[in-house]
Amino acid sequence: MSAVEKSVPITAEQADHIPWSTVFAYGAPGVGAGYMFLLLSLYVMKFSTDVLLIAPAVMGIIFSVSRVWDAVSDPIVGYLSDRTKHPLGRRRIWMLASVVPTCATFVMLFSPPTTMGIFGLTVWMAVGVIGFYSAITLFAVPHLSLGAELTTNYHERSRLFGLRHAAFTLGSILALASMQIFINAEAKGPEATRAAAEWISWLASGLMFALILFAVVKLRERAEFQGRSIGLPYQAFADVWRNTHARLLIVVSFIEQVGSAAIGALTLYVAQYVVGRLDLAPAIILAYMIPSAISVPMWIPLSRRFGKIRLWIFSMVLTGVSFGVMFSLPFIDAEVNRIWVIVIAAMFAGLAAGCGGTVAPSIQGDVIDYDEYLTGERKEGSYFAAWNFVYKSATGVMLLLTGFVLQVSGFVPNAPQSMTTQVAMVSLYGLFPLVCYAIGSVMMLRFKLDETEHGRIRAELYRRRHAGS
């Protein structure tokens, strides 16, 4: 029996069990989102530099601008969805509105006209990248917000977000098959790569379209949470910053994302130019993805046993160490040894990702309950928008830095790289994440909203809601 069960009587809220049908309907769009995000984060940079021949620094600027703008658009969508009143609810109507622009811009990214020169292709990719990240915001922020609303139970949230993480990872694994097709197509030339990218983008967009519609139809929103955000935008985000638990998570999340943002963009570069085996890149990523997905059922009971906070700290330490090991790759002479090092490190990093993906958003949901305790409002959209703002602004900064580091270190597309360039790559890929995750895990030791405190808060909210009834 947990500490909260010993100290606080169980209310109907705390016994708020979610049926599996709801869990699956909520997680389903994660498959499409995971597919699209992985393909963009791992391949669009390489597609642009190696196939379209756009300069790395230019693509770094495009990605940086897109993420900074995306960080601005997230709070807008979060605030507006909190205040939306519609028969579908305040979240699902936004998810529905995201379908067409998300799918259209994804196809655009992988279908640039063959008649365009470098300047035209640069403009096309800039519009596509910025457009996609703007459109997916319409889905992502309301979807995350809905997850925190579907249950108020401390551990049920972990089950809900754990399935979402597993679905997202499954989509990422499916994207690896597409990446293998792209890699094979690159060996045949740019025309073959363009053709493969176009038909795959149409297929992925159709899948995303269907999965979002499925979730919108199957899910239901809680009537008692509707119309519970009444402040102006600056008041809503001032409340987020005044929330001591949220403020700590914002700082920790920024440090984490600064450390990890370059990982996605550089994985294919490290596989090709440091390890020397681009053909093994999907297998290396799969070594990360499979443990991330299949470990979710393990982390949920462990979070009950050891606590969500301790488990998240553990995941940060394990992530930092796993990627830190990869700094050694350029200094390992034998190719087979480099392969073993990156595969084993990726497996442990995947385990850590499964843990973080399960418990981190669940903890964020608990912080939103604390805001209700302080203000009487439900502002899931504003809170998840604030965390996304941190994530995307940090990512924008690091992608800009990554592009310029590649350029300054002497990167030459489709050619062997100097030791200086290789060390620059693994410094961003391994050493920098190690430092950042170490700092974040130490800071997270100060987080105090544990199960006992959350139980006390939910009991008080339950008492307020039913006082006088």
Image (cartoon, helix red, strand yellow):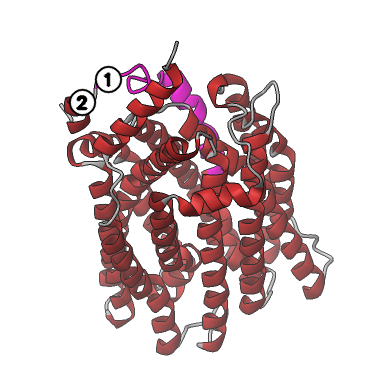
Residue 112 left/right relative to 347: right
Percent of width and height locating residue 20: 41, 20
Which amino acid is tagged 2? Glu
Q: Tell me where the magenta segment starts and ends, as one range.
A: 9-33
Q: Residue at x 38, y 78 (%)?
A: 427
Disc marking residue 5: 2
- Give the left or right position of residue 46, taking residue 347 as reference: right
Q: Which mark is residue 10?
A: 1
The residue located at (31%, 36%) in the rendering is 454
Is residue 27 a member of the stretch shown in magenta?
yes
Residue 178 appears anywhere in the view: no
**Sequence-earlier tag: 2 or 1:** 2
Q: Nearer the viewer, residue 131 or 91?
A: 91
Q: Quadrant where the N terminus lies?
A: top left
User: Observer-nearest residue: 325 or 391?
Assistant: 391
Q: Give the residue drawn at x 29%, y 82%.
A: 331
Q: Is residue 215 magenta?
A: no
